[in-house]
Amino acid sequence: MKIHLDLDCFFASCERAINPKLCGKPIAVGGRSDAKIFSKNFHSRRLYDKNKGAFVPNLFYPENKKEKEDFNSFFVENSENKIKIRGIITTASYEAREYGLKTGMTIRESLRMCPPLLVLTPNHLLYHEFSHNLYEFLKLKIPLIEQYSIDEFFGDLSGWVKDEDLFDFCNNLKKEIYEKFKLPITIGIANSKWAAKLVTSSAKPFGVREVKKE
Ligand SMILES: [Mg+2]
């Protein structure tokens, strides 16, 4: 059987993994782009080699990762005494989605719909590191694993896990991923990759669902 693994509100979950105070709150990741790419203090590097199979843009990240910047000015513009909030939401937490927020909405509109929303500027290096580390972890757990995007994977468990044990295997895997990375994930199980992907979308968030062969 095949499985599809999809991290839940991935960019927002990464931010929570490093800052647990954001848990349980409506948060969104958004802005014009990764603020770091405009800074001359950052060097460009590609993670393609490390992260093959993922849909990855060029990456830019600092030599000194501890370097911190205040990115607020990046997505708030104050010109002619009018404050403009620029950019779109790339990921909203499930708490924010309850207010009707969706990926692609402007930050301005999102803040109008969800006044308590916390907007975080993207940190793509962090997301790629989590994605890469999870991929390395999954390679140890699943004999055949394919990275499909930054937050999605396909796995083939044929001959590795008995059909009757699939659900428990995936449920344990989900728990293990949460304990190790603090990232919620949803897993779909089916007879084909694409069926498994459909199953995942119906099991979100933080679920496991199986569609039996028959
Ligand atoms: Mg996802």
Image: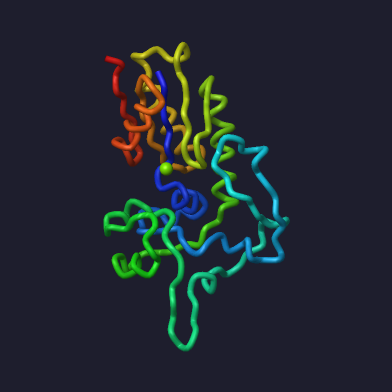
Q: Residue at x 31, y 70 (%)?
A: 112
Scheme by which the image is coloured: rainbow
Q: Nearer the viewer, residue 86 or 97?
A: 86
The quadrant holding residue 123 is: bottom right
Q: Position of residue 37 (x, y in %)?
A: 63, 61
Count of picture labels: 0
Task: Look at the image and tell me in which quarter the N terminus lies.
Answer: top left
The quadrant holding residue 135 is: top right
Does residue 115 sit above or below 13 in this rendering? Answer: below
Does residue 169 sit above or below 176 in this rendering? Answer: above
Task: Look at the image and tell me in which quarter the C terminus lies.
Answer: top left
Q: Position of residue 137 (x, y in %)?
A: 56, 31
Q: Nearer the viewer, residue 113 or 175?
A: 113
Left or right position of 206 against 63: left
Q: Residue at x 27, y 55 (%)?
A: 98
Q: Position of residue 34 (x, y in %)?
A: 56, 60
Q: Position of residue 205 (x, y in %)?
A: 33, 41
Q: Nearer the viewer, residue 171 or 160?
A: 160
Quadrant containing ligand 1 reads top left
Q: Residue at x 50, y 35 (%)?
A: 148
Does residue 76 sit above or below 9 in this rendering? Answer: below
Q: Residue at x 51, y 37 (%)?
A: 180
